[in-house]
Amino acid sequence: MATFAELEREADELVRSAGLAGRVGAREHLLASMAFHAGLNDSVHCPACRSVIQVEEFPQRNGLTITCPCGVCSGTMKGF
Ligand SMILES: [Zn+2]
């Protein structure tokens, strides 16, 4: 079972290897979806608006909707 700190390191690594390190919200978007899948209740905060990022599973359970009020971290993660 991954800890939140381990997920943070993994998210850092993935964002770096994907060349998204300079993109605001990319790490948090990913981290929020990873924490959801790991069953962790730790909140991930948007770096822009500081709100807690909300994660909801698609009704068909084949992806996630990730949202924050300002939209910087918003998006979907399909087949994850
Ligand atoms: Zn935001």
Image (cartoon, rainbow, N blue to C red):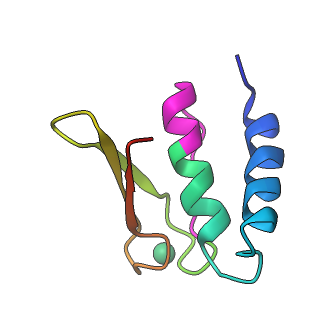
Task: Find residue 77 and report its image quarter.
Answer: bottom left
Question: Which residue shows up at 53% across the image and 78% down it?
Answer: 49
- Magenta segment's dominant SS is loop
Question: Which residue shows up at 49% across the image and 36% down it?
Answer: 36
- Seen in the picture, residue 63 relative to 27 is either above or below; the reply is above
- Image coordinates for residue 63, horizontal then vertical, percent: 33, 44
Is 3 placed left or right of 47 in the picture?
A: right
Where's the N terminus, which quadrant? Answer: top right
Q: Is residue 23 visible?
A: yes
Does 44 appear in magenta? yes
Does 30 appear in magenta? no
- Residue nearest the observer in this picture, 77 or 39: 77
Is 50 placed left or right of 53 in the picture?
A: right
Task: Find residue 69 and report its image quarter.
Answer: bottom left
Question: Which residue shows up at 47% across the image and 58% down it?
Answer: 53
Task: Find residue 34 and report its image quarter.
Answer: top right
Is 12 placed left or right of 39 in the picture?
A: right
| Residue extending furthest toward the top | 1
- Image coordinates for residue 71, horizontal then vertical, percent: 40, 78
- Residue nearest the observer in this picture, 25 or 68: 25
Q: Which residues are magenta?
A: 34-46
